[in-house]
Image: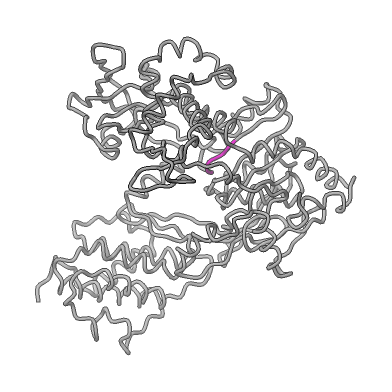
């Protein structure tokens, strides 16, 4: 028998790793021995679950699942299983503690390493860890080191780099926009610039990963780039000093009319409350007296940021959310610690099936206290709170530490079964296509134990997300075939890029300092739309008498006569929004998109009278009968 690597004797490594796993000093130990790292990682992951999981994990079940996962991933089909340490049906197998689980896993690991020397033991260890998590809820997961780094950046709210959004087009890095205030923006790098060299070496042919690895770097470090700018004969050379680049979580903040502000939050990261307050401060001088808060598609994030946002709508001392766990340290009630800046103003919150977790905490608190009108479609239904723990190699585990309850006491977590992650994730696609029918079916199935009352006595429901006060069906009547084809084939992006290459100076001179005039008055000419259609045809957009409705086939889109003219307004709106993104940045993309496409937002603006009735109820100036049309089974 050969040993794949030098292995510390079993009894010693067992004692050392077990001791270190409970002292909190394991990250200090460094070893060139991959097996030590792998075994340490396994026991750290196991410990993170047992010590922090909100429920009562079954150590035996976790261990057996981890071995089954590992065995299924072994590439050596000749490896003996029956009667060996990787046989989970072996009669003598007894796992009743972390120590038992670790010692058995060590034996299984060494058996594979010694008898299948070509196996990737790091990969098998990570597969085994995924097996541990397969026995838990769908939100407790293992995250590889590379994914963990990206995840940390997303929720830290910043990364370090040169500050550009880019696309690789025809093997060339094209700047979509320089992030406002970032180092590239300060040097005058602008949308449409092509980065052709990095550090005096060609950057042509780079993929996205290569671009990120070469342009991101430590704050204060420098990178030289050579840029080809349309309309400028000679290449331009820049030395860019990398800096912190914010990842904004407030996608848009602007006025819908003279008194209504609109703020869209895409996730709850470390900077979200600060961004929200900046957005509010920017809208107040413009006359904002009421707010539409858009949480559609927001998957959640930090609990603390959700609490901080929610308390801006309430007076001091209002309960916002509570968490419950088998661990006292994760059981807590959260109250507003101050009078919120918008505690007395009208609020409508937009939600949909993509709104989850922290989004449901905010909307749940506002609904339970009859403080805002919740509008849209039933939310995802994630009522569990996770915390991340770093392992020895910078990979992470995300463990559910508690479940949260809205102020009325409801748990909005939808049902799940251990190991049913895929079915759980796709539940939202299996809901009734009609948002009203979906809500009614959901409410009809809710037992009395999951029905709760708001402060004013309205019935609200737990166990499957938040049912809006006012349901708006998603607009599916407008065919998106053509615009989806244009986006997938990059026709709309390339059209705008080429348009700005030719007309950028003239466009900027006319519009750059007056976005609102652009938003209101800019239109594409008939010649430009004809050019766009020609580009579509070149990419496989086929007008034919052989179809009655759009149909994809062989990477082409076949449409009937007159279809392009019927829906060309969609292409016009999308390309106008793309110009706004490339000239002004992402925050200016959404106002144009919303103007053209967002029927839910438009309809929500007709509901301020309904909000008024809700406010009257909350103040004791109206009865439940006066707002019956807000209930899902008595809606409009």
Residue 131 visible to the viewer: yes
- Front-most of 374 and 28? 374
Residue stretch rendered in magenta on the structure: 264-268
Instruction: Classify residue 267 as left or right of residue 449.
Output: left
**Furthest residue toward bottom:** 91
Compared to residue 627, the image places residue 185 above or below, namely above
Which quadrant of the view contains residue 1? bottom left
Residue at (55% x, 15% y) in the render? 514
Residue at (41% x, 40% y) in the render? 544
Q: How is the image coloured?
A: one colour
* Membership of 141 in magenta stretch: no
- Front-most of 185 and 602? 602
Residue at (89% x, 47% y) in the render? 622
Residue 164 visible to the viewer: no
User: In the image, residue 361 lies at what x, y percent?
Assistant: 63, 51
Instruction: Classify residue 550 as left or right of residue 19.
Output: right
User: In the image, residue 326 lies at what x, y percent?
Assistant: 57, 67
């Amino acid at each position: 028998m050969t040993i794949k690597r030098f292995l510390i004797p079993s009894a010693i490594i067992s004692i050392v790793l077990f001791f270190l796993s409970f002292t909190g000093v394991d990250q200090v130990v460094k070893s060139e021995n991959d097996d030590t790292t792998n075994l340490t990682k396994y026991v750290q992951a196991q410990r993170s679950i047992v010590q922090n999981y909100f429920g009562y994990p079954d150590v035996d079940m976790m261990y057996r699942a981890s071995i089954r996962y590992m065995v299924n991933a072994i590439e050596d089909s000749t490896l003996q299983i029956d009667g060996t340490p990787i046989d989970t049906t072996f009669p003598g197998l007894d796992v009743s503690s972390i120590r038992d689980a670790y010692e058995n896993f060590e034996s299984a690991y060494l058996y594979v390493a010694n008898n299948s020397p070509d196996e990737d033991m790091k990969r098998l260890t990570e597969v085994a860890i995924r097996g541990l998590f397969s026995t838990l809820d769908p939100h407790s997961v293992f995250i590889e080191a590379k994914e963990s780094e990206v995840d940390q950046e997303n929720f830290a709210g910043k990364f370090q780099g040169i500050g550009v959004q880019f696309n690789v087009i025809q093997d060339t890095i094209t700047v979509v926009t320089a992030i406002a205030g970032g180092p590239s923006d300060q040097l005058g790098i602008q949308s449409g610039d092509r980065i052709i060299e990095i550090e005096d070496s060609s950057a042509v042919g780079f993929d996205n990963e290569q671009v990120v690895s070469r342009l991101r770097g430590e704050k204060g470090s420098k990178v030289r780039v050579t840029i080809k700018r349309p309309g400028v004969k000679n290449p331009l050379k820049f030395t860019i000093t990398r800096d912190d680049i914010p990842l904004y979580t407030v996608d848009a903040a602007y006025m819908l009319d003279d008194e209504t502000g609109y703020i869209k939050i895409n996730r709850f990261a470390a900077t979200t409350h600060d961004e929200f307050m900046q957005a509010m401060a920017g809208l107040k001088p413009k006359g904002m007296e009421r707010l539409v808060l858009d949480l559609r598609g927001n998957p959640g994030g930090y609990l603390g940021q959700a609490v901080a946002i929610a308390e801006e709508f309430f007076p001091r001392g209002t309960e916002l959310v509570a968490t419950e766990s088998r661990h006292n340290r994760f059981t807590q009630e959260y109250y507003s610690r101050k009078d919120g800046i918008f505690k007395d103003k009208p609020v409508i919150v937009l939600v949909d099936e993509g709104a989850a977790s922290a989004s449901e905490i905010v909307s749940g608190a506002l609904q339970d206290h009859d403080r805002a009108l919740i509008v849209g479609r039933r939310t995802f239904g994630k009522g569990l709170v996770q915390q991340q723990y770093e392992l020895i190699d910078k990979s992470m585990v995300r463990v559910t530490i508690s479940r949260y309850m809205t102020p009325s006491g409801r748990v909005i977590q939808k049902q799940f079964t251990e190991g049913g992650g895929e079915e759980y994730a796709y539940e939202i696609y299996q809901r009734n296509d009609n948002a009203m029918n979906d809500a009614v079916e959901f409410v009809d199935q809710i037992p009395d134990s999951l029905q709760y009352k708001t402060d004013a006595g309205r019935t609200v429901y737990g166990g499957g997300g938040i049912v809006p006060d006012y349901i708006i069906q998603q607009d599916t009547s407008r065919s998106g075939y053509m615009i989806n084809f244009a986006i997938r084939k990059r026709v709309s992006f390339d059209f705008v890029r080429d348009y700005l290459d030719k007309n950028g100076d003239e466009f900027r001179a006319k519009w750059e300092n007056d976005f609102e005039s652009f938003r209101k008055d800019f239109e594409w000419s008939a010649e430009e739309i004809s050019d766009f259609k020609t580009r579509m045809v070149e990419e496989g957009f086929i007008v034919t008498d052989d179809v009655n409705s759009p149909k994809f086939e062989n990477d082409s889109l076949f449409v009937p006569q007159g279809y392009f003219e019927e829906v060309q307004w969609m292409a016009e709106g999308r390309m106008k929004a793309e110009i706004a993104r490339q000239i002004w940045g992402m925050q200016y993309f959404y106002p144009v998109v919303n103007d053209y496409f967002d029927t839910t937002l438009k309809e929500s603006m007709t509901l301020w009278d309904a909000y008024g009735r809700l406010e009257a109820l909350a103040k004791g100036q109206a009865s439940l009968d006066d707002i019956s049309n807000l209930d899902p089974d008595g809606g409009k």
